[in-house]
Amino acid sequence: MYTFKIKSWVHYNNKERIMNKRKILVKEVMKREVVTVREATTLKELMGIFQKYTFHTLPVVKEDNRIVGVVALEDILKIFEPVPPHVMELVRRNPLWNESEERRINLFETDLSPEMGVLCIVKDFMRTDVVTIDEEATTVQARALMKLHDIRRLPVVDKDGYLKGIISLFDIILAVFKEKGIL
């Protein structure tokens, strides 16, 4: 019984301490200079950008900086799929579908023509179901969204969908470590 009381007291104390802790806002830790691409960016140009930076997920924006999608290195594999993903999803729902029949993409065995570098554009394989966050949100909310959607970077947008920055899991961890005096 005594142990239970101590655990209960510690739990309450931690909760109270967390409630009184300053909330770190996304706008305080986000990166304001964001590497972006356009829908018309070619595969060759995109690979050059991926080669230059250590991150491989980029917001896709219109000329006015309104976000329209996101593209990740993994999305490039969509180019080589024999059937578009939305059609494949319908096929998988069929109760007679045998998963072993699904053809896996082997990039090393696929015939690739040099023209693909300029003929394939970001619009062909980008994702349009973008998860974004407002700059007034907290880093706790940003992390919750990242966990929910299994992503590590969130575009930060204003109420009209214009890109204001980007926040990554690294940015959040760094801010927490600074707040706690670790760094």
Image: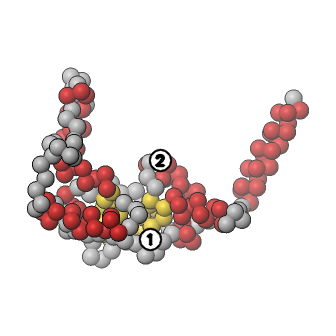
Residue 114 placement: quadrant: bottom left
- The local crowd at label 2, few if under 14, some if 14 to 19, many if 20 or more residues have their Cα within 10 Å, is few
Which quarter of the rendering shows the C terminus?
A: bottom right
Residue beneath the point at 77% across and 44% down: 11
Looking at the rendered structure, which numbered label has been put on residue 165?
1
Residue beneath the point at 87% across and 29% down: 1
Q: Position of residue 157 (x, y in %)?
A: 42, 68
Give the amino acid at mark 1.
Answer: Gly
The residue identified by callout 2 is 148
Q: Earlier in the sequence, mark 2 or mark 1?
A: 2
Q: Position of residue 22 (x, y in %)?
A: 69, 65
**Of the pair 19 and 60, the residue shown nearer to us:** 60
Q: Is 166 situated above or below 150?
A: below
Q: Is 166 situated above or below 6?
A: below
Q: Secondary structure at mark 2?
A: helix
Q: Is 7 situated above or below 178?
A: above
